[in-house]
Amino acid sequence: MNIGLAKLVKELIKNSFRPVTAEYPAIPVHARPHEPGEEVRGRHKFDIEKCVGCGACQTVCSSGAITITDSGLVRVLRIDLSTCIFCGRCRDICPEEGLQLTSEVGLAQPYGENLNSLKVEHSVDLSNCVGCGRPTYPRKQIEAVRMRVLSNLDKANVDSASKDMDIYLKYCPDCRRSLSYTLGTHPRKLY
């Protein structure tokens, strides 16, 4: 017991003569003892060219910070940074690498300031079903899935699959199911 008490007293004396914490944000940037490295997980940033709006990021978000809202033919992905725990799972799951975490960690702000600065948004266009007219999937996602599927098929099946995809990617899942025999896209035709 005396050894533990001695260590405690030694640590208390050491901390009495040196600062233990940095006075953030009062210290200027150039005087801070540590600069964030590349692996620091800060504010999110959507790559508008790569993000297809698939929603995989929302599925893995354990804090519920990512929400998806479909309104008409537009899907809005919204990240609430005041709820986010900056775990990076959304970045890791993104199949197109369309979401990154920057090294911008200075998100602290006085209470009552503009809370919209704590939100990151991105919107993508949805396609609508040719059969029933309902909004289906983001257009960019449909094209990304098409390219990924065709690149993983045997060369002998690419032409047939490409023709089928030209037809059924224009329909929602319900219309695909009900019209598969009529459109000639049912997999049964292969056997």
Image (cartoon, grey):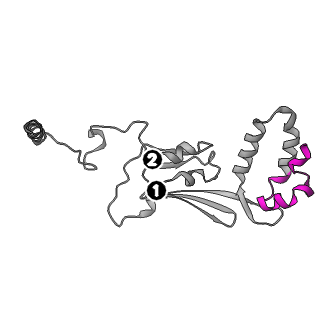
Q: Residue at x 35, y 67 (%)?
A: 112
**Magenta highlight range:** 167-191
Left or right of 56? Residue 1 is left
Please name the amino acid that badge 2 sits on: Cys
4 on left or right of 125: left
Label 1, secondary structure: give it. Answer: loop
Inspect the magenta stretch and tell me whether residue 112 lies in it.
Answer: no
In magenta stretch: residue 177 = yes
The reply to whether callout 2 and callout 1 are in contact (CB within 8 Å) is: yes
Q: Is residue 71 above or below residue 169?
A: below
**Residue at 70%, 59% in the rendered image:** 126
Seen in the image, is 110 located left or right of residue 5? Answer: right
Left or right for 138, reference 109: right
**Label 1 Cα neighbours within 10 Å, binned few <14 / some 14-19 / many ≥20:** few
Q: Which residue is mark 1?
A: 63
Is residue 101 visible in the rendered image? The answer is yes
Q: Mark 1: which amino acid?
A: Ser
Classed neighbour count for the residue bearing mark 2: other residues with Cα under 10 Å, few (<14), some (14–19), many (≥20): some
Lower position in the chain sequence, tag 2 or tag 1 = 1
Q: Residue at x 59, y 42 (%)?
A: 97
- Could you say which is closer to the camera, residue 27 or residue 148? 148
Q: Position of residue 120 (x, y in %)?
A: 50, 56
Residue on which the image places disc 2: 87
- Observer-nearest of 7 and 106: 7
Where disc 2 sits, the SS reads: loop
Q: Quadrant of residue 71?
A: bottom right
Q: Position of residue 74 (x, y in %)?
A: 66, 62
Magenta portion: prevailing SS class:
helix
Q: Is residue 172 visible?
A: no
In which quarter of the view is residue 55 placed? Answer: bottom right
Q: Position of residue 58 (x, y in %)?
A: 56, 55
Q: Which part of the image, by quadrant, shows the N terminus?
A: top left
